[in-house]
Amino acid sequence: MRRNPKIVLAAVLLSTVSLPITLTGASVALSDIAADLNADLTPVQWVVTGYNAAFGSFMLAGGSLADILGRRRMYALGLALFVVTGLISAVTNDIMVLDVVRAIAGIGAAAAAASGAALLAASFEGAARTRAFGLFGTAIGVGLAFGPTIAGVLVDAFGWRAAFAAPALVALAVLAMVPRLPESRDPAGRRVDVPETLSFTLFLLALIFAVVEGPRQGWTSLWIVGAFVASAALLVCFVVVERCQENPMFDFGLLRSRHFVAFSAAAATIICVMIPLLIYLPSYFTGVLGMTSGQAGATLILLTSPALALPLVGSFITRWIPPTAVVVTAVILVGVGAAWLTIIEPGISTIALAGPLLCIGVGMGVTTGMIDGVALASIDTRRAGTAAGMLNTARIAGETIVIAIFGAVLASTTGGRLADPGYTRGLHLTLWGMSGLAAVTVLLVALLLRRRASAPRPRPTVGPAYAAVPPTPPIS
């Protein structure tokens, strides 16, 4: 029986909107969670970091499993896991239980996101596929742009538990639509390689554990030093395993493309500034500036709304301005915005925050989607899927590590509390670090993209290879 692709589109768009909200919702609720569950910063940080780390680690494996087991089946399993963990998160009174189920929720979200994109690719062709993925990108933007506001209203009205319950209920509604979705699989697709998946996942988790737990257990403690050593060893193992694979998850040969490396670094840097601020600014707004959760979410629209409004502008202006110039300008805007945001202090007004927040948001928004097309334009279309997977994994892994570093700095300066004294100083330190990262990235991009006058300039494309593998955000 032929399935209606419009049902597929409706289901995937609904789940795509709900996945970012559960990340931004958790960030808006962190202060309330810490107060209600009597927890300090380190275990509370795992509510966000565990979800993001699990999401990033399982994304590529989830896509491969969807090809093998069936995309609808994997989509249903991911949604079911997301629903169950969301409801448990909404009722638990134990911070450790919350941390564990949030990590499991990240696995479910990754499975749903990867298989949802595969369902779209299998259900649409040609121009219809491009339009479907355009709506998919818009749904991601809506979730990121309005997620903090929606979560803030929910937290103000019903408490922090609503930030987990509401997305779970939306996912439950989508789960009811699954029987009407088509099943598809690709038995000849890339198989899941256990050694490479495990080595990458354990590398990321060991590194995150060391960074997050370092301030509490001491940087010289046996557990922390051991975790750093283990993460380095696992990274070496991952590289060795990948080099032995015929079809590796990370094709290191792609790193020979200077354009791909440059634009991937720029994409990762932009997201590594944007997402950590989405995580920790709400707690500063509520804990130091005295805003309600709803007011904090509304203020973050200044940061997130350009990601929804400007992607088409970025693609449009590349008709007259070289994509390289647009990307470099975007990274500069993000770096300048981070440095500018160091004006933040107790008593600052929302109007004063508007400039730096919009500056960062514009840098993010003008390159959303476009930067992926430019990066993939320098790669053979037969390797576009692998290249897109590498780009997305670099984004997610990078943002997860920066979130952990951000939290570690705050834990060190605040004594484990999301409040002043110490929160402002820790925030300033991380903002200057982000600005420095942007400056280094601008220099790296400039060095990598130095070219002879005769060298062809890659143009952004949105062809079948790119459309089938959309940019995956840190929704983680």
Image (spheres, rainbow, N blue to C red):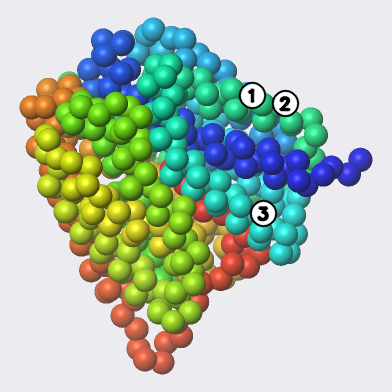
**Residue closer to the observer: 382 or 412:** 412
Q: Can residue 46 be seen in this view?
A: no
Residue 405 percent across, percent down from the top left = 23, 38
- Say which mark, if any, is on residue 395: none
Residue 330 percent across, percent down from the top left = 32, 64
Identify the mark nearer the N-term, 1 or 3. 3
The quadrant in which residue 300 appears is top left
Q: In which quarter of the image is the C terminus?
A: top left
Q: In which quarter of the image is the N terminus?
A: top right
Q: Are marks 2 and 1 in contact (CB under 8 Å)?
A: yes
Disc 3 element: helix
Q: Residue at x 34, y 75 (%)?
A: 325
Label 3 crowd (10 A; few <14 / some 14-19 / many >=20)? many
Mark 2 to mark 1 CA distance (whole Å): 7 Å
Mark 3 to mark 2 CA distance (whole Å): 21 Å
Disc 1 element: helix
Q: Farthest residue toward the top? A: 93
Mark 1 to mark 3 CA distance (whole Å): 22 Å
Residue under label 3, please give it: 132
Residue 283 percent across, percent down from the top left = 26, 29
Amino acid type, label 1: Leu
Q: Do the residues labelled 1 and 3 touch (CB within 8 Å)?
A: no
Q: In the figure, 320 relative to 31: above or below?
A: below
Q: Farthest residue toward the bottom? A: 454
Q: Is residue 357 visible?
A: yes
Residue under label 2, please give it: 176
Q: Farthest residue toward the right? A: 1
Q: Are marks 3 and 2 in contact (CB under 8 Å)?
A: no
Amino acid type, label 3: Ala
Disc 2 element: loop
In the image, taking residue 359 as reference, residue 103 lies left or right, namely right
Q: Which residue is drawn at 47% across and 15% down?
A: 90
